[in-house]
Image: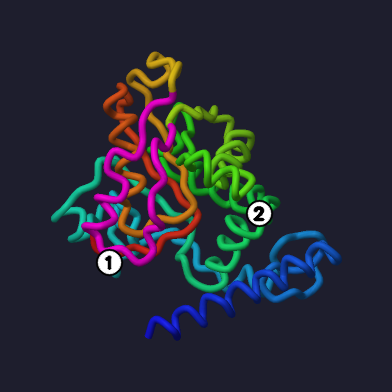
């Protein structure tokens, strides 16, 4: 089983790397299927495969639900609510969105920041709570991971989203220690992995957070542990409410 998963990971990485090489020599290709585009990172056919979450979602965690009532709250949030007042994800984290996020994070396809942020801006503008936010706070990377990756993808998204919505960006929290990747961890391990991992940056002005409503921005939500751990730091610092916003959603039990 582990060997099969490892092989799939290698093959997936090879496909993404092949697209990266193609984009270097032919920058007007789709990052998913490698077809020619007019300079867009994704062709119309692949864009049509992405599944935006526009209705029928939990009003707290954003998880898609079968019922279409606007005020529906899922059983997971009734059982174990998040510290976040609301979470919204632009789309389901399935093919081809998973490939695009992978390229954005690990293959330095930073131009996807504008592509994603335009979609996130529509989510913010259509949501009464998120649209009322005072600032956007990106989930930080540890300094070592940022150096290795070359940038923090959430910060790139936040800067682009700020310019498109007029909501200012605050880079006010830091990741105190390196955390394991959450991918193969249980819900309990995920919570323990990020517990105490975030803190306010030295010199951050607490008045910038006092009684403010904040959007906490990340690439993907699964259990919500990372967003929740960071939200607790912001709430402890005086924020009134914190809303989560992500590109993709692949919800699991928490």
Residue 29 in the figure: left or right of residue 17: right
Residue 39 in the image, given as x and y percentages of width and height: 80, 59
187 part of magenta stretch: yes
Q: Quadrant of residue 230?
A: top left
Pointer 1 residue: 67
**Disc nearer the start of the sequence (2/1):** 1
Circle on res. 112 = 2
Q: Quadrant of residue 56?
A: bottom left
Indicate the quadrant containing the C terminus: top left, top right, bottom left or bottom right: bottom left
Residue 186 in the image, given as x and y percentages of width and height: 26, 64
Distance from label 2 to label 1 (Cα)? 32 Å
Q: Nearer the viewer, mark 2 or mark 1?
A: 2
The part of the chain drawn in magenta is 174-201
175 part of magenta stretch: yes
Placement of 80 over or under 236, stated as above or below: below
Dot 2 and dot 1 residues touching (CB under 8 Å): no
Q: Which SS class for mark 2? A: helix
Residue 128 in the image, given as x and y percentages of width and height: 40, 39
């Amino acid at each position: 089983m582990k060997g099969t998963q490892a092989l799939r990971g290698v093959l997936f990485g090879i496909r993404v790397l092949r697209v990266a090489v193609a984009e270097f020599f032919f920058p007007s290709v789709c990052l998913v299927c490698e077809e020619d585009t007019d300079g867009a990172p994704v062709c119309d056919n692949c864009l049509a495969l992405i599944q935006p979450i526009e209705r029928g979602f939990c009003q707290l965690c954003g998880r898609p639900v079968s019922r279409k009532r606007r005020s529906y709250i899922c059983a997971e949030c009734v059982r174990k609510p998040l510290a976040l007042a609301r979470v919204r994800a632009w789309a389901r984290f399935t093919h081809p969105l998973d490939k695009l996020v992978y390229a954005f994070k690990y293959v330095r396809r930073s131009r996807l920041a504008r592509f994603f942020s335009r979609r996130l801006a529509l989510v913010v503008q259509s949501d009464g709570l998120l649209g009322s936010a005072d600032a956007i706070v990106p989930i930080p990377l540890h300094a070592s991971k940022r150096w290795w990756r070359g940038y923090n993808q959430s910060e790139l998204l936040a800067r682009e989203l700020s310019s498109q919505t007029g909501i200012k960006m605050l880079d006010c929290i830091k990741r105190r220690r390196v955390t394991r990747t959450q991918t193969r961890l249980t819900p309990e391990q995920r919570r323990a992995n990020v517990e105490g991992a975030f803190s306010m940056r030295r010199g951050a002005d607490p008045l910038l957070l006092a009684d403010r409503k904040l959007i906490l921005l990340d690439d993907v939500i699964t259990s919500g542990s990372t967003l929740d751990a960071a939200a607790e730091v912001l709430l402890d610092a005086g924020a009134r409410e914190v809303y989560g916003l992500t590109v993709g959603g692949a919800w699991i039990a928490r």
